[in-house]
């Protein structure tokens, strides 16, 4: 199935080919673009070689169009949120970790939740689903 990913604020499309594009800022105030594989549970990413990312670093993730901070502050400050649209126009909330190397993704629609990544178990209780 073909999915699109959009910003929850401006509804701009974040997907190019098989990647979701984010603007990020590191703890050291470095800024850059991060391209994350769009398949849920696939944690491969691409970045510019000058953007230093180390395991455990906390990122701030932004929409590259409207520059809104995508942090999911109502759920957990380690997570960011975007929207996934399926071919029928159904919307799903997608939450993912902003901690480099932490494999956490959630796909939520109403009371249904799917989790991906070996680190997701530590976040399940934050959703109340």
Image (tube, grey):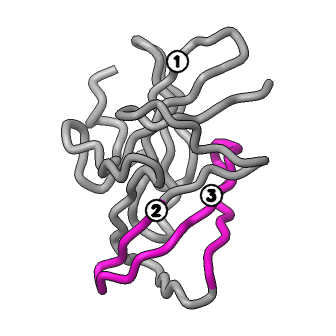
Over which residues does the magenta segment extend? 23-48
User: Where is residue 92 shown, x and y percent of the image?
Assistant: 51, 23
Q: Residue at x 32, y 48 (%)?
A: 68
Q: What's the distance in space between the residues labelled 3 and 1, CA to CA?
A: 20 Å
Q: Earlier in the sequence, mark 3 or mark 2?
A: 2
Q: Work out which quarter of the rendered image holds the C terminus and state it.
A: top left
In the rendered image, residue 16 lying in the magenta stretch gets the answer no
Q: Residue at x 62, y 81 (%)?
A: 48
Q: Which residue is mark 1?
A: 91
Which of the two discs, 1 and 2, sits closer to the camera?
A: 2
In this rendering, would 76 be left or right of 3? left
Q: Residue at x 62, y 12 (%)?
A: 89
Q: What's the distance in space between the residues labelled 1 and 2, CA to CA?
A: 23 Å
Per the image, label 2 sits on a secondary structure element best described as strand
Q: Which residue is mark 2?
A: 23
Q: Nearer the viewer, residue 95 or 127?
A: 95
Q: Which residue is mark 3?
A: 36
Q: Earlier in the sequence, mark 1 or mark 2?
A: 2
Per the image, label 1 sits on a secondary structure element best described as strand
Q: In the image, is residue 44 above or below residue 42?
A: below
């Amino acid at each position: 199935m073909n999915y699109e990913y959009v910003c929850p604020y401006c509804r701009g499309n974040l997907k190019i080919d098989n990647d979701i594009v984010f603007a990020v800022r590191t703890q050291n105030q470095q800024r850059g673009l991060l391209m994350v594989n769009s398949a849920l549970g696939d944690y491969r990413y691409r970045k510019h070689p000058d953007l230093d990312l180390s395991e455990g670093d906390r990122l701030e993730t932004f929409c590259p169009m409207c520059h809104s901070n995508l942090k999911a502050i109502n759920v957990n400050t380690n997570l960011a949120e975007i929207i996934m649209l399926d071919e029928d126009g159904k919307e799903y909330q997608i939450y993912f970790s902003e901690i480099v190397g932490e494999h956490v993704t959630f796909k939520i629609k109403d009371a249904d939740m799917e989790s991906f990544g070996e680190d997701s178990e530590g976040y399940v209780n934050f959703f109340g689903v």
